[in-house]
Amino acid sequence: MPLAKRQFELRVDEEGENLMRQVYELLAGHPELAFSRQELEGAALGTPVPVTQLSKFRRALEVLLGIGAVDQREVAGTDYYAFLQEFDTNTWVSKKIPF
């Protein structure tokens, strides 16, 4: 099955993009909160987290960080993730107004 050009550029397949969207929408829906990676894994993949999906999930999170959609900080030895800026989840282009 062919990939969309943006999926190719981001190096994710349809499933990876869906994981990106799930994580992004959770964080965007709660911009006042930061979630641990484990909390995001559980929300996106269910509990118990299927080990076979972890690498795809981690790539999705890496892409969200790379494009600037989410932010990551370590707090007390745990990585937390928070909403950073608005993106169009169909194109993964920032909605930030250029100056």
Image (tube, rainbow, N blue to C red):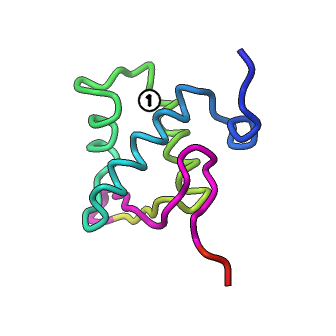
> At 56% from the left edge and 62% from the top edge, which residue is drawn?
68
The image position of residue 34, as x and y in percent, is 29, 61
Split into 4 quadrants, where in the image is the N terminus? top right
Residue, x 55% and y 39% (percent of image)? 59
What type is the residue that disc 1 sits on? Leu
Outermost residue, bottom side: 99
2 shown above or below 8 = above
Asked if residue 77 can be seen in this view, the reply is yes
- Label 1, on which residue? 54
Q: Residues within 10 Å of mark 1 (few under 14, many from 20)?
A: few
In the image as oriented, which residue stretches furthest toward the top? Answer: 1
Q: Is residue 38 left or right of residue 17?
A: left
Quarter of the picture containing the C terminus is bottom right
Answer with left or right where residue 30 lies relative to residue 73.
left
Does 9 appear above or below 32? above
User: Which portion, as a residue range, is magenta?
Assistant: 75-96
Along the viewing direction, whichever of 31 and 80 lies nearer the viewer: 31
Residue 10 locus on image (x, y percent): 68, 43
In this rendered view, identify the residue nearer to me: 26 or 36: 26
Helix, strand, or loop for circle 1?
Answer: helix
